[in-house]
Amino acid sequence: MLRSLLPFLALCTGIASAEITNIGSRRELFVDRLLIDQMQEATLRLHPPEEAGIAVKFDQPWEGRFSAYITVIHNDEAKKFQMYYRGNAGFKDGSSGEVTCYAESADGKTWEKPKLGLHEINGSKDNNVMLANLAPYTHNFAPFIDQRPGVPKEQRYKALAGLGGKSGGLSAFVSADGLHWQKMQEAAVITKGAFDSQNVSFWSEAEQCYVAYFRVFTGGGVDEKTWKPKGVRWVSRATSKDFIHWTDAVQMTCDQPLVDHIYINQTNPYFNAPHLYISTAARFMPKKDVLDEQAKKYLAEDTKAYPALIQDCSEAVLMTSRAGTTAYNRSFMEGFVRPGLHFRNWTSRSNYPACGVVRTGKSEMSLYVERHYGQSTALLQRFTLRLDGFASLHADYGGGEMTTKPIIFTGKALHMNLSTGAAGSVAVEIQDAEGKPLPGFTLDDCKAVSYDDIDRVIGWKTGSDVSALAGKPVRLRWVLKDADVYSFRFE
């Protein structure tokens, strides 16, 4: 109904309908500038996650120092967390020596490797190997739980896996329990791309289709003589209604120049705002050797198995996209998870994030990052953020403000995820589409909030009920002092 009224509302206000964003009652995070019109002395601030201990050590013979391409899933129905990852103790990529391993957790913090009894490794089935002797699919098997309404139970889990070249591309797999898998068809379902990394897919509630993000090179592949990439590693996207028939791949655009290599993209809908796709990607810096001689001496034993270990470095970065678009937003070009103090993380392909940001507490969410890649100490580390806390609208003690573009909302109250200092505050003024304060909702009427809360309702002298403004184009003027606002929604 609101969508059909937009042209009429635009005529009444003199605003082009394309400039009005209908946010309904969805949650909006301050990770991009889609809704921002003006800012004065306020900024968007990235919030790097905090270290929270070791999640998994890749210390079993079938796992090894080249364990990688990790997926973490929160299974709501089973009330557990599931982890999938490649085990590779030194075999050639895409060879039969690679396996896919499985771990699970009740809380996302402490992980166990169950003895699945599915495959015999080194004379025993007492291991956590889920897939074996299934090259090249064990190289980068990337599952998800299919949330599509009406999906058959035998296809509740789905995955894409495979390599290019003779392997043909990405093949589609299904499973009822996430442990026993079969191909949906023999032929690959996505064939155009450079698939030698983790290629992710999911059911999009917002788009009502399956979406896949996978590796490409901006210059069209690699030089067959030197094997050097043409351009940089980047990302393309395709969609499907049935997970078998996919649209032609479309290379993602970006609001920043494509100057660095994005090795894995890890794009997934954010669980608390599924119209927003969060990409905890890996930025790869080839031939950037930063280690001193003492560090190289410590790594001498590991570099015997992997000489390229000390030639490159990498880190995690944050990119975002919105459902239905083919564009990434990179408001934050700085590192999201830096290599840190330990020299073992300043090595080739360390610090690659797992696919999946999951909620591990009322106000906490977790993500997971590979550390010490290619080394005898290889592990997966857990990091934490506050709920919705990737980034924020921020102002320091001197204060600042931001005014949105015209929006339309549904709901009765404005909820915020915010944090202020004791001397800080957040206030909101509601304006009409032209920027004139609305009676009863002016800045003077607002009861400014000073607190730290993931769900705080803001009010004015007459109360918090804003339902009289629902369905009308309005602007929100945020006035902050020593404060961060992470997200908001009307509900």
Image (cartoon, grey):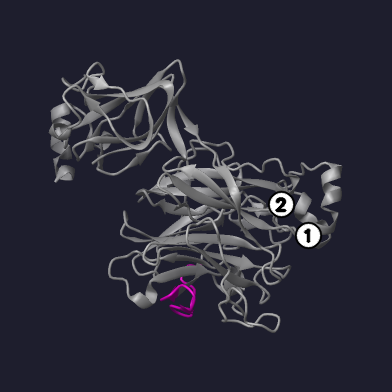
Quarter of the image containing the C terminus? top left
Task: Pinpoint residue 119: horizontal percent, then vertical percent.
Answer: 60, 81
For label 2, the residue is 348
Q: Residue at 46% of width from left, 18% of height from top?
A: 397
Q: Dot 1 surroundings within 10 Å: few (below 14), some, or many (20 or more)?
A: some
Work out whether 157 lies above or below 270: below
- Disc 2 is placed on an element classified as loop
* Magenta segment: 174-191
Residue 391 colored in magenta in the image: no
Q: Residue at 38% of width from left, 66% of height from top?
A: 146
Work out whether 16 lies above or below 239: above
Which of the marked residues, 2 or 1, is nearer the chain's N terminus? 1
Q: Residue at 23% of width from left, 27% of height from top?
A: 459
Residue 285 visible somewhere in the drawing: no
Q: Is residue 178 left or right of 275 when viewed as pictured? A: right
Task: Pinpoint residue 79: horizontal percent, then vertical percent.
Answer: 40, 63
Total marks shown come to 2
Q: Is residue 472 left or right of 98 when viewed as pictured? A: left
Quadrant location of residue 198? bottom right
Foreground pick, 276 / 120: 120
Residue 187 colored in magenta in the image: yes
For label 1, the residue is 306
- Secondary structure character of the magenta stretch overall: loop
Amino acid at circle 1 = Tyr
Q: Are marks 2 and 1 in contact (CB under 8 Å)?
A: yes
Q: Is residue 7 left or right of 393 when viewed as pictured? A: left
Q: Dot 2 surroundings within 10 Å: few (below 14), some, or many (20 or more)?
A: many
Foreground pick, 118 / 165: 118
Task: Pinpoint residue 148: horizontal percent, then vertical percent.
Answer: 32, 65
Residue 211 visible somewhere in the drawing: yes
